[in-house]
Image (tube, rainbow, N blue to C red):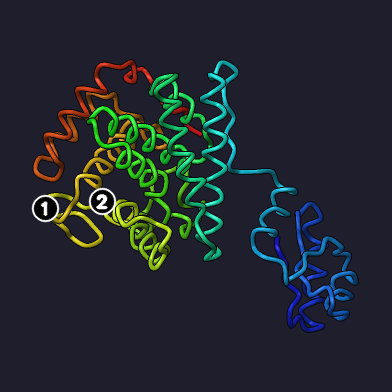
Amino acid sequence: MVIDFETFSPEQVAFLRRFLQSVPDLSWLCIVDTKNRREVLQAQDIGLNNHFDREDNVSALMTRIREMLGNYTQPDLDADCPELVAKTIGATCQVLDQVSIAALTDGPLPMPTLARTANDLAKTIKSDGLDNWISAVQNHHSHTFCHTMMVAGHTVSFSKDLGLPEETQLLMGLGALVHDLGKVKIPLSILDKPGKLTDRERLLIDKHPIFSREILKGRKEVPKEVTDMAVWHHEMLDGSGYPDGLKGDQISQTVRILTICDIYSALTEKRAYKDSFSPRQAFATMFEMGPKLDRELLKSFRNKILTTDLGRLRRTAN
């Protein structure tokens, strides 16, 4: 529990004292103005000496909380995970964490670090193979981190197979890494829910492209192509997608590629409330979507995926 002592009345302090006595095992951190003697004494009066200065920034607060509870962002990798894959996953998780904090605090996004991460990810997949990457990232306890890294792996690999210019491949990697950025505004209790989502929860998750647009608006450090991928990767060629109902030529090739990788990753992931599809099952479902997806790109993606061993991979449910 994080407790902010600003404007606490004596009655509220008394209530808080009674509450804390009823939950002796609760972890807590109190926010005070360390130059305000009244606030400091109020906290000390009920035994709360773990202080955080209100003038410090949110990033520092996150660091303090992690010191108490552990770092949620890092995965538990198998002992036989290739060294380069493990190193790149750790770096990717770290930069995704930095991006999330920047989005929540309106700070500058670490674009140079993101670019290096996308480049390192491509090199890792080229060296150790896409199947090793997908197998390892599926061990992450966070569905959002797992999904983002799966999509990024498929996207950089597919972009290379298509022979896109290196500059475009880098943009594709950047877009994949931030494509679900808007989900930072959705509670983890919904994102990592072990059961099926309610209609209300699904409606909230479907707003994440809108949240991405709000976060990325006016950020000159972010290429337009990357913003387009974050906002429009749920648009469909027939106009049935969201959030803007784009159709046909209004949807760029980069967005079309990311959309295919995003849908395929979602279908082949395993969650507590659903089994993962095999690659063939996933492609059958995607081809049934007909005019919604770019059929030629989908055929190229299928031909690449079905030449690998990815059909044996399953994500372990939480």
Residue 140 position, x and y percent, is: 52, 34
Whether tag 1 and tag 2 are in contact, CB under 8 A, the answer is no
Circle 1 packing at 10 Å, graded few (<14), some (14-19), many (20+), is few
Q: Residue at x 56, y 64 (%)?
A: 105
Q: Would residue 196 be found to the left or right of residue 304 on screen?
A: right
Residue position for label 1: 249
Residue 213 position, x and y percent, is: 35, 63
Between 142 and 201, which is closer to the camera in this rendering? 142
Question: How far is mark 1 from mark 2, CA to CA?
Answer: 15 Å
Between 295 and 45, which is closer to the camera in this rendering? 295
**Type of the residue with mark 1:** Asp
Residue 14 position, x and y percent, is: 82, 76
- Residue 312 occupies quadrant: top left
- Upstream in sequence: badge 1 or badge 2: 2
Q: Would residue 65 be found to the left or right of residue 171 on screen?
A: right
Q: Residue at x 17, y 60 (%)?
A: 245
Q: Secondary structure beneath disc 2?
A: loop
Residue 1 position, x and y percent, is: 70, 60
Circle 2 packing at 10 Å, graded few (<14), some (14-19), many (20+), is many
Q: Residue at x 36, y 37 (%)?
A: 151
Q: Looking at the rendered structure, which numbered label has been put on residue 85?
A: none
**Type of the residue with mark 2:** His
Q: How many marks?
A: 2
Residue position for label 2: 234
Question: Is residue 51 depicted above or below 234 in this figure?
Answer: below
Nearer to us: label 1 or label 2: 1
Q: Would residue 152 be found to the left or right of residue 139 on screen?
A: left
Q: Secondary structure beneath disc 1?
A: helix
